[in-house]
Image (cartoon, rainbow, N blue to C red):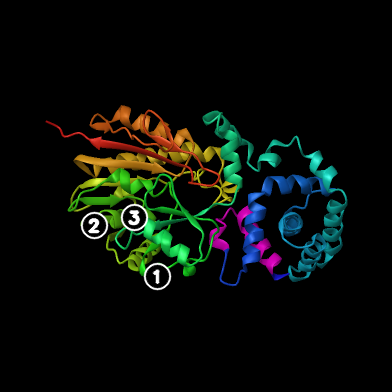
Amino acid sequence: MQEYQSAVRVLSAVVIDGKSMDSQFNSGDSPLSKQISYGVIRDYYHLNALLEQLLKKPLTGKNINVHLLLLAGLYSVNNLNRPAHASVNATVNATKGLKLPWAKGLVNGVLRNYLRNQAHIETSIEGDVQAQSNHPEWLLTRIKTAWPDQQEAVIAANNARPPMTLRVNQQRLTTAAYLDLLAVSNISARLATHAPSAIYLDAPISVNLLPEFEHGYASVQDEASQLAAGLLTPAAGMRVLDACAAPGGKTSHILESFPGIALTALDLEEHRLVSVAENLKRLDLKADCVASDLRDFVPAALFQRILLDAPCSATGIIRRHPDIKLLRRNSDIDKLAATQLELLNAAWALLAPGGILVYSTCSILPTENEDVMRQFCNATTDAVLIPIEAEWGHGQKYGRQLLPDLVGHDGFYYSRIAKAVQP
């Protein structure tokens, strides 16, 4: 019963208040409550369509928690590894803890009606594109327009549970050696295809179970994100700026890969740098952490390398953060692209002549990627595009785009440009 109360609290924060789901969990939330919360948000459009068929009139306003509880009940009936009637009973019992005693009969009736008529009700929503894809219509349109040949694979990957990916600290040991350590610990895993430091676990586990995790042998980081350091390639002694550093995965990877650089980790707010500092401490790495808007940042000297992992729609990591489908709006995309161009121009002013800037996003939408880079390069006379020759992703005029892979990497975009040395 408590699990459903926790799930309704989290779902309400996301659906009603527009808050990030990850920020709403607390130490008292059980793994089951988290599974239900993530499951409902991942399948939100499908579950919502089912519920519309089951209710005579919508549950809105002060009754919205009943609506959310019913979504949790429908998810539980279809996905939890227990008899359906047990999920129905648990959902019904939760009405008491949620102080909704009047809804007990409604919840019981709706869920039992679904069990009796499941096939018919599922058939009735077959023509609902949002329900069948579990994506909002605006996002479906953008995906289909940008990636007509890959749209089905992208949607399938977005709706899947993400793999757990590790980055092996090459200052401690090789990737192959850490794979052997995992095998000794009976943790099944495989080497990644594109990032030399990446390993995929066959099943997610607590980081506390990873060999030597506390001593910095490995970190959790998606394979696509691990490609950034290799594109930056700073030499020892260079000043490097990680312009939007939190939570610190790329920051620490750059430092692991290129000892001897002077790295500044910049992010907008002080509290966002806490996770960066924690990562650096565990890995015994050092960087100058600075809280500032990139557009206002005045460094002591220019940088030879800059990574700008720009704020974006995060449409390439929906499977890790399914609430993106509910929190983002179509109108957000153009606003984000305008901000990305502003940040790109601000970063460029901090780059020394002869230096290299790597622009990246975890978006799959061209508006935030190729379009931004085209505008920037066309307006910036000293910008020299450096083609990214690689086996990964889809080559484009200004960069390379990785799309989310069902059993592999997230969606990510990279572009690399050099600042010409003026005669």
* Residue 348 against residue 35 in the figure, above or below: above
Res 135 visible: yes
Q: Amino acid at mark 2?
A: Pro
Secondary structure, mark 3, is: helix
- Callout 3, which amino acid? His
Of the image marks 3 and 1, the number of the one nearer the N terminus:
1
Q: Residue 256 appears at what percent x and percent y?
A: 30, 57
Closer-to-camera residue (421/394): 394
User: Left or right: where does residue 78 sit relative to residue 31?
Assistant: right
Rendered residue at 58%/37% (across/down): 153
Q: Quadrant of the C terminus?
A: top left
Q: Earlier in the sequence, mark 2 or mark 3?
A: 3
Q: CA distance from mark 2 to mark 3?
A: 10 Å
- Residue most toward the left? 423
Mark before the other along the chain sequence, 2 or 1: 1
Callout 1 amino acid: Glu
Question: Measured from the top left, where is residue 151 in percent x and y?
Answer: 58, 34
Residue 26 sits above or below residue 110 on the image: below
Tag on residue 253?
3
Q: Residue under label 1, please give it.
A: 214
Q: Quadrant of the N terminus?
A: bottom right
The residue that mark 2 highlights is 259
Q: Residue at x 28, y 57 (%)?
A: 255
Which residue is pictured at 66% across the width and 43% down the height?
134
| Secondary structure mainly formed by the magenta segment | helix
Q: How far across and down, in percent of the image, does residue 282 sit?
A: 36, 68
Q: Can residue 253 be found in the magenta stretch?
A: no
* Label 1 environment density (alpha carbons within 10 Å; few <14, some 14–19, many ≥20): some
Per the model, the C-alpha gap separating discs 3 and 1 is: 16 Å
Residue numbers of the magenta segment: 3-24
The answer to whether marks 2 and 1 mark residues whose Cβ atoms lie closer than 8 Å is no
